[in-house]
Image: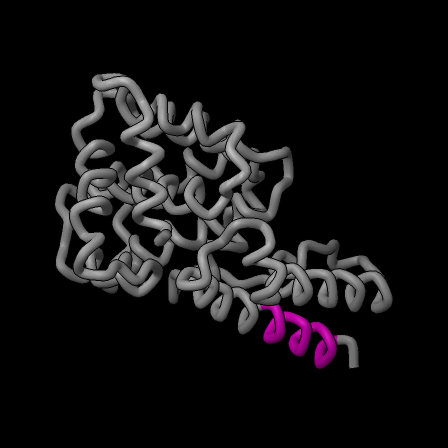
């Protein structure tokens, strides 16, 4: 059974009229993390579309780059998107429910943020409304400003890129500590690790930008430290 069919089943199992918020509550205790991840990105992506005032063809294409939607499953994907777009619940409520589906510090929340950044940057512009939207989602997910800036730097061309921020270490850290942080970050970004925590195979490609940023930061630190 495809992920989209499982999503349709998750929605159909709910009583009519409960809305997408009830889907999140159901998924909170569900072992099928892939379905939870996909619905979360669709729902917040639909809400984010309002942040810059319109949905562009580029944004739709970007979503398809993350999630391959077979023609026979397009109706299921569209149903989730439309439920999110028309639901009276605000994006903060969605983000809170999504946050509650995962343990504190779960790296899947970073994966989700990267999916949203990928969609936001699809049209080549980073709108102030999108920045405010994503910053607020990051706050709800429990990210501090440094962690948010680290993710933003992977996607926004003119964002500041501090190699120590990218690796999540202090500039005063010794090389052994920095090397350990680099290795840990590379390990967490490995496709097998991402799939194990519920990221759909199609979305693993998002980690490519993270891996590039991690390795570039490590090389910068090595060069600066001689």
221 drawn magenta:
yes
Between 112 and 176, the one lying in front of the other is: 112
Residue 179 relative to residue 19: left or right: right
Magenta span? 214-224
Between 12 and 165, the one lying in front of the other is: 12
Question: What residue is shown at x 63% (from left), y 34% (from top)?
Answer: 104
Label the magenta part by its dominant secondary structure. helix
Query: Is 217 rendered above or below residue 36?
Result: below
Question: What residue is shown at x 55% (from left), y 47% (from top)?
Answer: 108
Residue 53 relative to residue 19: left or right: left
Q: Residue 113 appears at what percent x and percent y?
A: 45, 48
Question: What residue is shown at x 27% (from left), y 30% (from top)?
Answer: 12
Residue 139 relative to residue 55: left or right: right
Asked where in the image residue 68 lies, by quadrant, the reply is: bottom left
Does residue 122 show up? no
Asked where in the image residue 134 lies, by quadrant, the reply is: top left
């Amino acid at each position: 059974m495809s992920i989209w069919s499982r999503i349709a089943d998750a929605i159909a199992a709910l009583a009519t009229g409960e809305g997408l918020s009830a889907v999140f509550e159901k998924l909170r205790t569900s072992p099928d993390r892939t379905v939870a991840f996909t619905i979360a990105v669709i729902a917040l992506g639909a809400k984010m579309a309002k942040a810059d005032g319109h949905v562009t063809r580029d944004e739709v294409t970007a979503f398809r780059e993350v999630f391959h939607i077979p023609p026979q499953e397009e109706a299921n994907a569209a149903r989730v998107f439309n439920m999110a777009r028309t639901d009276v619940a605000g994006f903060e409520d969605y983000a809170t429910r999504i946050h509650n589906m995962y343990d504190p510090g779960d790296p899947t929340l970073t994966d989700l943020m990267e999916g949203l950044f990928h969609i936001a940057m699809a049209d080549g512009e980073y709108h102030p409304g999108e920045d405010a939207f994503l910053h607020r989602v990051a706050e709800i997910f429990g990210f501090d400003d440094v962690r948010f800036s680290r993710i933003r730097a992977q996607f926004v061309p003119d964002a500041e890129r501090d190699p120590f921020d990218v690796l999540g270490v202090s500039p005063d850290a010794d090389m052994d500590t920095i090397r350990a942080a680099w290795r840990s970050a590379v390990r967490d970004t490995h496709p097998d690790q991402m799939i194990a925590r519920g990221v759909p195979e199609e979305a693993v490609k998002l980690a490519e930008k993270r891996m590039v940023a991690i390795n570039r930061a490590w090389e910068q630190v090595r060069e600066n430290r001689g």
